[in-house]
Image (cartoon, rainbow, N blue to C red):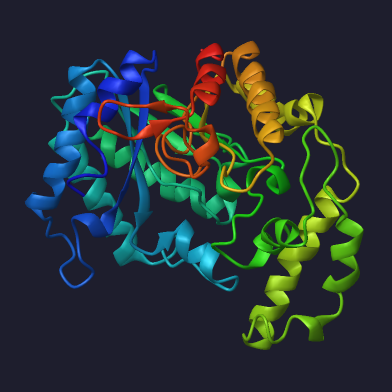
Amino acid sequence: MDEFYGEEDVALLSDWGFNFVRLPVDYMLFESDERPGVYDEDTLSYVDRAISWCVDYDVHVNLDMHHLPGYGISDYAADPLYEPRLWSQEDLLERSEKIWRMLAERYSHIGGNLSFNVLNEPMAEMSAYKRFLERMISTVRKVDRDRLIFIDGLDLAREPVPGIQDENIVQSFHNYEPMWVTHYGADWAPGPYIYEAGCHLADETAKYPGVPPRMDRFSDVISRREDWENLVPETDRKLEALFDNIRNFFSKYNGVRADSDWLEEQIEPWLEFRKNSGTPIHCGEFGVYAPRVDRETQLNWYRDIMGIYKEHDIGWALWNLRGPFGVIEHGREEFLKEELPDGRRMDPKLLKILQNGL
């Protein structure tokens, strides 16, 4: 934690011309489930420090609650039968309110350089999620009437939330479409990632613009359950949930050509929502997993998506600054052409595309 995120990172991105940082924080950083409502000042000081650096460099920091008691996207991704408790369990809702009250009070002295992101990538029924949002927004408003609040869309930040009555709200979508390009070779999780992770093992190169490679070859086997039972030794219910994810993935992408027009179609509902509601929109996450993807595919996708954001005046936050989706030490040694003052290396070609999108 002392080394992962430093002042030099904020200085660097500011010098590059960027003015926004999304700072993910899990509640477990400062609160344990054994002692709810007791907050660790030592670990909260890391959040204080990060926010202060952004203020010093006039960079807006979006404090993103990546995990609250009873819900986290990592839990959902790890278990296809995961059932969040946050939406319906009153003690967890109250804990979440207390967390946001504490943060609102703690940072009430920070001006317009700070905003709050209520919760990362929710999965819920719309009515339950709206009730949750209204409670959290009301909690913040009792402390800070003017703080800018970002809310992620439903279904992993893919569906706008209608009817939120607050003037200082931004709705945020996450954009990793098409998944067979942006997550090519990302084999950290099973389930819907089997195709993306598997096609590189079978020398199936994803090319963008284009159609997903040889999906017929993979779709031939997804119905043969016995081929997967040893690979995914789960209960019958979990295995069936896994297969549902895979079938949905194939039905969405099989034979579909992805290009700039297709990418724009994916965010059209958000453009319509902004037009009809007057609510600002923002892309809170996007990027391409760099370690295995074809280089021209990677750069072509970034050029197209940055052009779309620029044309439609959509702000954005890349996931991430440093790491496999980022511009610094992303895992492709041959493209990290420039050394930074601290010895890390960066991808100047990718950085230029991002800067051209400003």
Q: Is residue 146 visible?
A: no
Q: Is residue 329 above or below residue 302?
A: below
Q: Is residue 36 left or right of residue 337?
A: left
Q: Please identify the quarter of the rendering in which residue 58 is found.
A: top left
Q: Position of residue 337 (x, y in %)?
A: 47, 28
Give the residue displayed 21% in from the left and 49% down from the top: 1
Q: Position of residue 113 (x, y in %)?
A: 27, 20
Q: Please identify the quarter of the rendering in which residue 301 is found.
A: top right
Give the residue displayed 79% in from the left and 53% down from the top: 204
Q: Position of residue 83 (x, y in %)?
A: 52, 70
Q: Is residue 321 above or below residue 134?
A: above
Q: Is residue 197 left or right of residue 94?
A: right
Q: Is residue 48 above or below residue 93?
A: above
Q: Is residue 243 left or right of residue 118?
A: right
Total label count?
Answer: 0
Q: Is residue 170 visible?
A: yes
Closer to the camera in the image, 149 or 216: 216
Give the residue displayed 55% in from the left and 22% down from the top: 349
Closer to the camera in the image, 230 or 263: 230
Q: Is residue 241 left or right of residue 48?
A: right
Q: Please identify the quarter of the rendering in which residue 299 is found.
A: top right
Q: Position of residue 276 (x, y in %)?
A: 65, 20
Closer to the camera in the image, 131 or 255: 255
Q: Is residue 75 above or below residue 137?
A: below
